[in-house]
Image (tube, coloured by chain):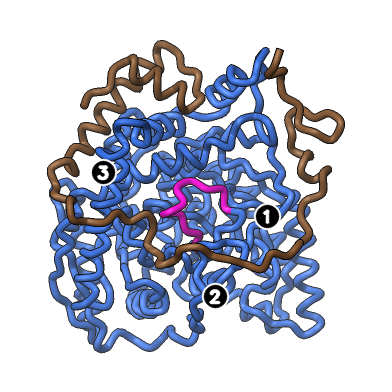
Chain colours: A brown, B blue
Amino acid sequence: MALSEKDVDHVARLARLEISPEERARYVKQLNAILGHAEDIAGLDVSQVPPTAHILPLHNVWREDEVHPGLTRDEALANAPDKAKGCFRVPKIIE
Amino acid sequence: MDVAGRLRKKELSSVELTKAALARIDAAEPKVHAFVTVDPEGALKAAAEADARRAKGEAGTLLGIPIAMKDNLSTKGLRTTCSSRMLEPYVPPFDATVVSSLRAAGAVILGKTNLDEFAMGSSTENSAFGPTRNPWDTSRVPGGSSGGSAASVAAGFGYGALGSDTGGSIRQPASLCGVVGLKPTYGRVSRYGLIAFASSLDQVGPLARTVADAAALSSAIDGHDPMDSTSVDAPVPDYAALLGKGVRGLRVGLPKEYFVDGMDPKVAEAVRAAVASLEAQGASVREVSLPHTPHCLSVYYLLATAEASSNLARFDGVRYGFRAPAESLVPQYMRTRAEGFGPEVKRRIMLGTYALSSGYYDAYYKRAQQVRTLIVRDFEAAFRDVDVIATPTSPTGAFRIGEKADDPMTMYLSDIFTISVNLAGVPALSLPCGFDAAGLPIGLQLIGRAFEEGTLLSAAQAYESAHDWKDRRPSL
């Protein structure tokens, strides 16, 4: 299941990562090496084995639906790279 | 902690102790680079508060003790970078629960320690702010990803530190730096305020000079937290009371799959000698088998990267952290992430995104979760016959800076003995058990049943007290 340059471009788009031609070439090589190693699990018969997402016997964890104090608007915005009128500011999305 | 006794007897104040720690940092930090941020002002203020609390009659073990925090644990008002350009300017508006717990116990936070960016790595070379160096030999790595925390303890900067462990990131640097490191059971310690890497594996835990110190830190941070829905409401024993009980009757298992080709023979020898020492103290030893061990690395790198690709999607340059401006939003996301993340983080995001992507999910992610079940069952079966499993923590001592930097697969192999523990969710501890031919520390890993940290601490302390490894310190 070898990864091509086209696959790498597709994955980079999904991951929202801009990559250079050098990075593309490097990822093809490195990701194929790692996935090649991971082929060892392809041969195991797991047809009757349930998946483990995490090891706790927890499902939903509920709490009472009560209002607790949270961050103020100023605290929430304090780390914003750009802000205006009490909001996070980003480039225009809709023309 | 010996020093806790001196504080209690008022031979020494926390302010004096903290000033001495800051002076050691001033002197040796340029050689080690354990910290991303040192916070002398905050530390001295906390020390003065601790002294005031003691004057009013408080007397906790950690009251007034200087410690360090890995820089992926949120500290209110103190920059928290994950050693990434992406979070270089980030100042959290809240404390992680483990940080508030330690503050409540009166611990003094000296600063934030260096790590592999977003805890992804085994050498602390992947930090955007430069590598940390091993105090035993500054041409070598301290291990990773909690390399700054381990180095800070080994260098004697503080009396303990917190780290996080997703595939060995507390235990492997503890081993390489000659200190004690404990990865608690999944669910034992709150992760609220730990910046997430792989949520089904991450766990916060202590690093310290001695087993008793690690136990003191564990007592402060263990337990249920309503702010973390994956933390478990299980009773926390009094760890200090379990120390000194010895190992008579303890059943120790040696997994045959963990003594493999390619490991340093001195490491295997030291670990076998450590197990023989436990046997001489009354433990019984038998071979056990964890047959799916050869698959752990693959399962780990598929699951951890998949979870990381999802967790790190939040870094988009909108709400906090670094932004690389662009004329429209999606190019801005893509440029921000390209410039804000370093090479290892991007490589893992790419791998994880691929493993989760349409058409490959069943072959990679789901299959890895199924094999994870087989690994969990291996441990369940082994723990029917033994109480503790003993292995090397790392196949070799500390390697040279740059030695493995260009080959991700070789670097990943240095976690080969630690990752199974995270997949199974059980607790494990690393403690010093000797030195290799180059004079570098070797670590013994003890793995226990879920929520049996007390058994590990007790066994580790029995071993520790029969040897003088903990008294050997690096000369910086």
Chain letter of disc 2?
B
Q: Numbered disc 1: what chain? A: B
Which is closer to the viewer, label 1 or label 2?
2
Residue B461, position as x, y percentages in the image: 39, 77
Residue B298 disc label: 3
What residue lies at 31% left-to-right and 64% top-to-bottom? B445
Q: Which residue is mark 1?
A: B22
Instruction: Identify the residue at image location x=74%, y=38%.
Output: A79
Residue A56 appears left or right of B276: right
- The vertical placement of B465 against B182, above or below, is below
Q: Which residue is mark 2?
A: B219
What element does badge 1 sit on? helix
User: Within the magenta stretch, is there residue B90?
Assistant: no
Which quarter of the rendered picture does the N terminus of chain B lie within?
A: bottom right
Report crowding for label 1: few under 14, some 14 to 19, many 20 or more residues within 10 A (C-alpha).
many
Which span of residues is magenta-colored?
B194-205
* Circles 3 and 2 on the same subunit: yes
Looking at the rendered structure, the kind of residue marked 2 is Ser
Residue A34 sits in quarter: top left
Regarding mark 3 in the picture, which secondary structure is present there?
Answer: helix
Q: Earlier in the sequence, mark 3 or mark 2?
A: 2
Give how far across and how far down residue B23 sits, in percent.
Answer: 67, 54
The picture places residue A46, in percent across and down from the top left corner, at 18, 51
Q: Amino acid at mark 3?
A: Ser
- Is residue A85 rendered to the left or right of residue B122? right
User: For the residues carrying marks 3 and 2, which lies nearer the camera in this image?
Assistant: 3
Tell which circle, 1 or 3, labels the residue nearer the N-terminal end.
1
